[in-house]
Structures are given as C-alpha cells and as structure tokens.
C-alpha cells in the first residue's frame, strides 16, 4: 500500500478515537443530570410533606389554645354561682355550663383526631426522608463513578493527542491540510474503507475500474460521491471483477 495512505489510515484511527472519547466526555454531565432528577423529586415530595406537617402542627397549637381559653371562660362562669337569685336563673346557668362543657369536649375530640393525623403525617415525612436520602446516596455514588470515568477518559484523550502530535510529523503538510479539511466537512471521517465496491463513508457504489485501483492501493484515490480518501483491505481478485463488469454490462444492455 502507498505509504502515505497507510499513514492517513492510522491518523484516521487515532482521530476516530479522539472524537469518540471527546463525545463520551461531553455526554457524562447529561448522565449525571439523569440521576439528579429523582433526587430533586424526592426532595420536593419530602418538603411538601414537611409543609403539611407544619401546617397541622400550627392547627394543633391553635386548637390547644382555644381549649385553654374555653376552660378559662368556663371557670369564670362557674365562679358566678353566688350571683344567681332565682331557680329559673339557676336552670339557665346549668344549661350554659353544660353547653360550654359539651363545646370543650367537642374541641378535645377534634384535637385528638388532629393528633392522630399528625402522627400519620409524621410517618410519611420519615418515609419520604428515607427515600430522599437513598436517592441522594445513589446520586453521590453515581457521581463518583462518572467522575472517575471522566478522569480516565481525559487521561486517554491526552495520550491520544500526544500520539497524534508525534504521528503527524511524518505526514506532508499539504496532505495533512487536505485531510483536516475532509475531516471537518465529512463528519469526522476523512479516510473511509471500501468493501465490495461500496464506499463505507457514504455507502454509495464505486465504479469497478476505480475499485480495482483502490484495491491495488498504489495511489491516494477518492470517492467520486463524498470525496473521502478510500482504501481497501480486500485482495484484488481480477477474476471476480471481470465477471462483475460483464454482469454490469449485461445489466446496462438490459436497460
Ligand atoms: Zn463515498
């Protein structure tokens, strides 16, 4: 094979790995953000439950104060017994006390219900807290793995770049410029392999005569469709090609 072509094939291999490694490094923050979402969701769920608990706690305190005030009022009312002058007044007085006592009992029952709900919500808060801590732990573990992955890939990238810098010293400047131009415009593939008369850069068919020359590997040849530099690892098999050409000709005459 043409020595320059050999060099370009090797350069393309290095560049392919550089591009792949760079893309993988860029993808890692996206992977991390995938693990951040469940942590945030768990945190939100926990906060929501905590807010619910706090609001119930406030309600409970207000209820306790309300009961205390009602008890004060009841005690004051009871102390007025001396002011009662008639039986009728006494009956009304007893009724008033009964109503106040019933009212307090009702409020005490409400308080008990509230305390029960509070206990249930407390349980949910604890569950949500546990779920949040688990998600957070998972994120931190994943973060550690991915940090290590980034670190390893950066080391590999540095190696590849050093390898590349040493390697391109052997390539003629004009050819290198041409290669770089192709690399930019052809999505990172400047040198493509060909197999069975197909360019693996663009997947289009290569004319048989050109393919024979590519298989020989004596020149730097390009794909007539995508302009990429082509090479072949296939052994030239002229018998096959001759038959293929004949079939192509037959097909042409069929049209
Ligand atoms: Zn092509």
Image (spheres, helix red, strand yellow):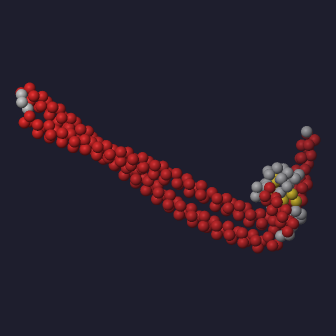
In the figure, is residue 88 to the left or right of 179? left
Q: Is residue 241 visible?
A: no
Q: Is residue 183 above or below residue 243?
A: below
In the figure, is residue 2 to the left or right of 45? right
Q: Position of residue 155 (x, y in %)?
A: 64, 69
In this view of the protein, which residue sits in the foreground, 92 or 202?
Answer: 92
The residue at 20%/38% (across/down) is 104
In this view of the protein, which residue sits in the foreground, 101 or 8?
Answer: 101
Q: Position of residue 46 (x, y in %)?
A: 42, 50
Q: Is residue 178 above or below residue 56?
A: below
Q: Position of residue 114 (x, y in %)?
A: 29, 42
Q: Is residue 51 above or below residue 227?
A: above
In this view of the protein, which residue sits in the foreground, 94 or 174?
Answer: 94
The residue at 63%/65% (across/down) is 153
The residue at 88%/62% (across/down) is 220
In the figure, is residue 180 to the left or right of 83? right
The residue at 14%/34% (across/down) is 97
- Residue lying farthest to the top in this orientation: 88
Q: Is residue 94 visible?
A: yes
Q: Is residue 109 above or below residue 220?
A: above
> How many tags in the picture?
0
Quadrant containing the C terminus in the rendered view: top right
Q: Position of residue 126 (x, y in %)?
A: 36, 52
In this view of the protein, which residue sits in the foreground, 68 or 32?
Answer: 68
Quadrant containing the N terminus in the rendered view: bottom right
């Amino acid at each position: 094979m043409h020595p320059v072509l050999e060099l370009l094939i090797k350069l393309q291999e290095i560049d392919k790995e550089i591009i792949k490694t760079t893309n993988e490094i860029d993808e890692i923050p996206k992977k991390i953000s995938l693990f951040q979402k469940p942590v945030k969701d768990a945190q939100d769920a926990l906060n929501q439950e905590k807010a619910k608990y706090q609001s119930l706690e406030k309600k409970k305190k207000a209820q306790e104060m309300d009961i205390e005030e009602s008890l004060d009022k009841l005690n004051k009312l009871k102390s007025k017994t001396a002011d009662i002058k008639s039986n009728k007044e006494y009956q009304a007085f007893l009724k008033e006390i009964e109503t106040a006592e019933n009212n307090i009992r009702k409020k005490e029952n409400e308080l008990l219900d509230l305390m029960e709900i509070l206990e249930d919500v407390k349980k949910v808060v604890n569950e949500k807290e546990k779920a949040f801590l688990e998600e957070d732990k998972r994120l931190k573990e994943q973060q550690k793995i991915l940090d290590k992955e980034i670190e390893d890939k950066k080391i590999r990238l540095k190696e590849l770049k050093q390898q590349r810098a040493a390697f391109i010293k052997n390539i003629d400047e004009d050819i290198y410029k041409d290669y770089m131009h192709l690399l930019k415009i052809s999505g990172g593939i400047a040198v493509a392999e060909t197999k069975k008369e197909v360019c693996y850069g663009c997947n289009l068919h290569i004319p048989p005569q050109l393919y024979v020359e590519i298989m020989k590997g004596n020149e730097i040849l390009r794909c007539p469709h995508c302009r990429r530099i082509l090479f072949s690892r296939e052994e030239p098999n002229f018998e096959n090609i001759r038959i293929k050409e004949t079939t192509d000709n037959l097909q042409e005459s069929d049209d």
